[in-house]
Amino acid sequence: MRSHVEFRSSALLDAQGDETGPKGEAVARLLAAGLPGHRYQIERVDPEDWGWRVQIANSAFPLWIGCGHIRNMPTAISVSSNRPGPTSGAG
């Protein structure tokens, strides 16, 4: 399962204004609005020092998606998950 995606989109850039705040809010809000249609329950959307975090309800482990911009690439957006990878061995 892919856990990191990078893409370019001028349509998903944050609104002009506060250039000092974290980037990625537009993508985070888009995901938070769309994921419930795929049976994911969104707990909250929070700013972080690196971008925006979309917290997803999950009883097995903490799950969130991070959204932010890539430096020196004005229309590049990075989206990644903290989903743990598969474990090896049974014990």
Image (cartoon, rainbow, N blue to C red):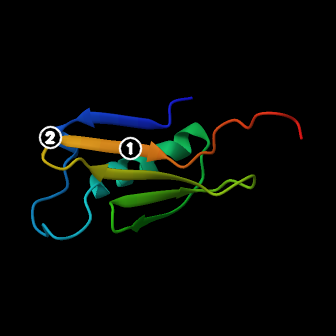
**Quarter of the image that includes the C terminus:** top right
Residue at figure coordinates x 54%, y 49% from the top left: 82
For mark 1, give the secondary structure.
strand
Discs 2/1, front: 1
Residue 67 vertical position relative to residue 19 in the rendered view, above or below: above
Q: Is residue 58 left or right of residue 77?
A: right
Q: Residue at x 16, y 70 (%)?
A: 20
Categorize mark 1 by other alpha carbons within 10 Å: few (<14), some (14-19), many (20+). Answer: many
**Quadrant of the image occupied by residue 7:** top left
Q: Residue 74: where, in percent of width, then height? A: 12, 46
Q: Secondary structure at mark 2?
A: helix
- The answer to whether residue 50 is above or below residue 10 is below
Q: Mark 1 = which residue?
A: 79
Question: Horizontal placement of 15 versus 59: left or right?
Answer: left
Upstream in the sequence, badge 2 or badge 1?
2
Q: Residues within 10 Å of mark 2 (few under 14, many from 20)?
A: few
Give how far across and how far down residue 15 sits, in percent: 15, 58
Q: Tell me whether the residue at label 2 lies in contact with that at label 1, contact meaning CB atoms closer than 8 angstroms.
A: no
Residue under the image location 14 percent in, 40 percent down: 10
Report, in whole angstroms, how far the alpha carbon at label 2 lies from the one at label 1.
15 Å
Q: Nearer the viewer, residue 90 or 4?
A: 90
Q: Which residue is mark 2?
A: 10
Location of the N terminus (image quadrant):
top right
Q: Nearer the viewer, residue 45 or 51?
A: 51
Q: Residue at x 64, y 57 (%)?
A: 62
